[in-house]
Image (cartoon, rainbow, N blue to C red):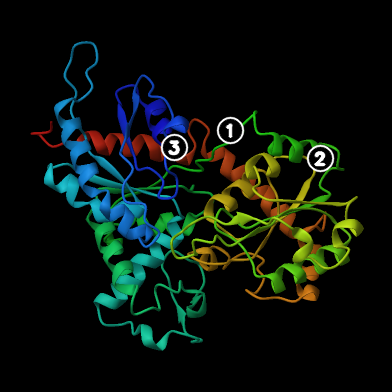
Amino acid sequence: MAKLLVASDDRIFITLIIIPSQFSSDASSSYPKSEDRLLYFHLPVGDQTTQQTFISYIESQKPHVRAAVSELTKNVPKRSGSRRRLAGIVLDIFCMSMIDVPDEFNLPAYTFYTSNASFLGLLFHVQSLYDNNKLDVSELKNSDAEFDVPTLTRPFPARCLLSVIISKEWLPSVLARARTLRETKGILVNSSGGMEHQALKFFSDMKSNTPPVYAVGPILDFKTDDGDEKGSQILRWLDEQPSRSVLFLCFGSMGWFGEKQVREIAVALERSCHRFLWSLRRPSHLGHMNCSPPEEFKNLEEILPEGFLDRTAKIGKIIGWAPQTAVLGSHAIGGFVTHCGWNSILESVWFGVPTAAWPIFAEQQFNAFQMERMPEMVTAEEIEKGLKCVMEQDSEMRKRVKEMKDKLRTALLDGGSSMAALRMFVKDVVENIPKNAF
């Protein structure tokens, strides 16, 4: 996102404040190097105790962020001898608790929202219903109720709501985040007009009572590590497979299944007779709630059906981590079974790959709402049916994905909707610069 902004206008300088990972002791060797108008400010490693949640870890970084902004106000980058002004602060969606930092320095706050505009509309809708006493979360669990969400074209079932929304413990945090988003000067969304026409139409209406929403996507990272031998082996294997013959199963950086479900997937893959590339991992020993990533299995034979690896050796490959964008860009990929993370959806559409949705947590249920989806726990027979559907070569699904691919790529062309939104964002940022800015 930062690189896109810098490239869009030569007046812009950006300092990206980097919070170190909660789970690595020292990632400084992998930090990017500052460029001409894109600088990186690396914060010190904070408290990394396993007892700390992701939210509390981000909160513990606030003093460091405040100090970084204070330093930045004293050393605003200069160009050609002219003084430049600090125009504002863009907050990541997970750092909304830091909105008081730009307030302290009298700076406009913006948000980079890495999910989609439709889901953003759902958050605002839930918050509005709750604040107007029109929502009782205690009645939503296992309910057949539906919501008329203004960013969707059809009613949304309550059973697909995030667990945090129907949780009395977590709902206050969700509502607080939605209210904070309303306080910002604008929201950058990783989407495009072609992907979410209804949602962006709603946000363009002054009656929506929300900040401006700028759909500047898709923002994708196509870089691969040439020195990664595991990744190279995967791509070489794909190069040897026929065109659109391989089914790719990958469930994101946090996705994993229990042993029973893994065996059901394995049985379905073998029965389907399709070639497959399966990213299979187990839950972290640190626990799911700390947002620690899954780990690779040490012995696959312990969890897979007996003899599975031998019987599928010529048509399948099981891996741990996957270079997802490179895999989806391979000529061999014919279908994608995904957890429905928003990045994964954008990447699959970009490469024109049909998907079967298998949401696991977070907003993935919402993302899967208008897709071909599978239940959370399914049998081998149900999985096999879904696999055959997504791999059908001349299906209506494949044609629709091709149409969406063309729209998504057109948005990034000069004159496309995303480029127009990016220019509008820069224009509004310049107009919102405080007169007494640093």
Residue 396 rendering spot, x and y as whole percentages: 75, 59
Mark 2 crowdedness (10 Å alpha carbons): few <14, some 14-19, many ≥20: few
Per the model, the C-alpha gap separating discs 1 and 2 is 19 Å
Residue 162 rendering spot, x and y as whole percentages: 46, 71
Q: Earlier in the sequence, mark 1 or mark 2?
A: 1
Are the residues tagged 1 and 2 within 8 Å (C-beta)?
no
270 sits left or right of 288 in the view: right
Residue 432 rendering spot, x and y as whole percentages: 19, 39
- Residue topped by disc 2: 237
Residue drawn at x 22%, y 18% is: 78
Q: Amino acid at mark 1?
A: Lys
Tell me the quarter of the image containing the C terminus: top left
* 370 to 298, vertically: above or below: below
- Residue topped by disc 3: 27
Helix, strand or loop for disc 1: loop
* 67 to 280, vertically: above or below: above
339 sits left or right of 318 in the view: left
Helix, strand or loop for disc 2: helix
15 sits left or right of 117 in the view: left
